[in-house]
Image (spheres, rainbow, N blue to C red):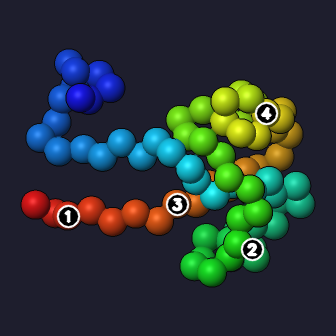
């Protein structure tokens, strides 16, 4: 079931679950290409929870940029 049934679409994917997570304390991720494949994210966060929530598995205040990563595929049908 769609999280907001009044906004139902023909197709959607729920992306909740484990995502790679990384603090970017030096704000260097973009310049260092953290968006490229093969860059390791040392932590995991449970989405849809924010990093401040203990339910996320992080449970820390955020005072810098953060990055999320997850691989997935979908069908166009």
* Above or below for 7 versus 46: above
Q: Nearer the viewer, residue 70 or 36?
A: 70
Which of disc 3 and disc 4 is earlier in sequence? 4
Residue at the spot 56% in from the left edge and 50% down from the top edge: 18
Residue carrying label 2:
31
* Above or below for 43 versus 54: below
**Tags 4 and 3 touching, CB below 8 Å:** no
Quadrant housing residue 69: bottom right
Residue carrying label 1:
75
Instruction: Tell me residue 7's x, y (percent).
Output: 22, 25
Which is in the foreground here, disc 3 or disc 2? 3
Which of disc 2 and disc 3 is earlier in sequence? 2
Residue carrying label 4:
59
Which of disc 2 and disc 1 is earlier in sequence? 2
The Cα atoms of the two marked residues, 3 and 2, are separated by: 20 Å
Classify the position of the N terminus by image quarter. Answer: top left
Classify the position of the C terminus by image quarter. Answer: bottom left
Residue carrying label 3:
70
Residue at the spot 29% in from the left edge and 22% down from the top edge: 4
Q: Residues within 10 Å of mark 4 (few under 14, many from 20)?
A: some
Which of disc 2 and disc 4 is earlier in sequence? 2
The Cα atoms of the two marked residues, 3 and 1, are separated by: 17 Å
**Tags 4 and 1 touching, CB below 8 Å:** no
Q: Residues within 10 Å of mark 3 (few under 14, many from 20)?
A: few
Instruction: Classify mark 2: helix, strand or loop.
Output: loop
- Mark seen at residue 13: none
Instruction: Classify mark 3: helix, strand or loop.
Output: loop
Which is in the foreground here, disc 1 or disc 2? 1
Q: Is residue 52 left or right of residue 13?
A: right
Q: Is residue 24 left or right of residue 56?
A: right
């Amino acid at each position: 079931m769609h999280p907001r049934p009044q906004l139902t679409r023909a197709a959607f994917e729920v992306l909740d679950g484990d995502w790679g997570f990384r603090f970017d304390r030096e704000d260097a991720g973009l310049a260092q290409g953290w968006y490229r494949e093969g860059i390791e994210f040392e932590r995991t966060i449970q989405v849809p929870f924010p990093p401040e929530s203990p339910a996320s598995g992080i449970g820390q205040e955020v005072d810098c940029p953060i990055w999320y990563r997850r691989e997935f595929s979908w069908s166009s049908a």
